Image (spheres, grey):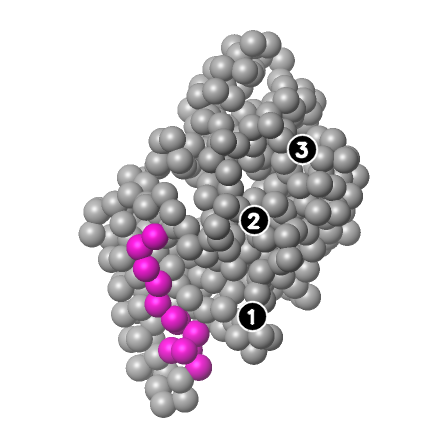
Amino acid sequence: MIDKHSRKINYLRVSVTDLCNLRCVYCMPAGGSELSERDEILSFEEILKIIKHGVSLGLNKIRLTGGEPLVRRDITSFIKQISDIEGINDIALTTNGINLKEHADALKKSGLSRLNISLDTMRADRFSDITRGGNIQDVFDGVEEVLKVGFTGTKMNTVIMRGQNDDEILDFVRYISERDIELRFIELMASGWKNMVDADRFIPSAEIMEKIQEIGELVPVKERVGGGPATIYRMKGSLGSIGFISAVSKPFCSTCNRLRLTSDGKLRSCLLSGGEVDIKNILRSSSLSEEELADKLTETFIKVTTMKPIVHSGENKAVMNQIGG
């Protein structure tokens, strides 16, 4: 699939649930967000049908997100089914790490290629505050288990916020210096409710890089595992690497190769803007023959691909756990 700006689309991010076992301050309101009814959520069978059709149109890379994907029952069996689809050559999963220790071995055996672990502080008290009650030791234990069972290319996603965790930048760098992990500093992005993100907390990647270079030179990395929008560097003597995702200060839309599938069945062209089509209603239409359904799915993928904007709007009217941010 090629969009109207000549970008090749081969990557689908799939939110398998809008449920989460944390309530991170930058992801959802303090009272939580409105959750979908159970029958509104796509079944694994429906998701597989969408993925298989997408593969026939050129998709070869899948990322599973949420909410928190590891809270959905039978997630490892589902990953095994995806890995059995001919044409898929990369399956990744984004997790907050809370349930990772108990799932790491099964995830490795399921055929999962890589993991992204979200962590925004190295300190127990701050983790509890940011996540509204989470236990950071669960994440640390999960990280060690992931490395133990043999995952490579593991990424740690960190959102740096001024006045909240910006004094920990070097703590993160020291942590990955002893572990084979790609630390990725992600710029804070606005989300879908008023005053959820205070602009005063935004820190551009350039400022984070300047801070890191106080303790060592950052050398660009040309080859990396899994691709993606991050600009990657290494520091002498460090086992891990450091990446920067500058979606706000330096949008990478010109190389965007992805579509998104929400847990309630919307195929989206962009995280922040562009448009979406309800693909669930098409799948559940009892009036369509198999051939008609295939034609409708193709039509939907092509339509959403043409919706992709040349650059995102910078504004998001949805809540991150609802669209697999």
Residue at 61% across, 45% down: 25
Which numbered dot is residue 36?
1
Q: Earlier in the sequence, mark 2 or mark 3?
A: 2
The region drawn magenta spans 273-284
Give the residue at mark 2. Answer: 27
Residue 201 place in picture, x, y as percent: 52, 32
Q: Earlier in the sequence, mark 1 or mark 3?
A: 1
Which numbered dot is residue 121?
3
Q: Residues within 10 Å of mark 3 (few under 14, many from 20)?
A: many
Q: Amino acid at mark 3?
A: Thr
When asked about the image quadrant of residue 321, the answer is: bottom right
Relative horizontal placement of residue 276, taking residue 117 as reference (left or right): left
Is residue 57 located in the magenta-colored stretch of the structure?
Answer: no
Q: Amino acid at mark 1?
A: Ser
Q: Residues within 10 Å of mark 1 (few under 14, many from 20)?
A: some
Q: Amino acid at mark 2?
A: Cys
Inter-mark Cα distance, 1 to 3: 30 Å
Q: Secondary structure at mark 2?
A: loop
Is residue 282 located in the magenta-colored stretch of the structure?
Answer: yes
Residue at 74% across, 31% down: 123
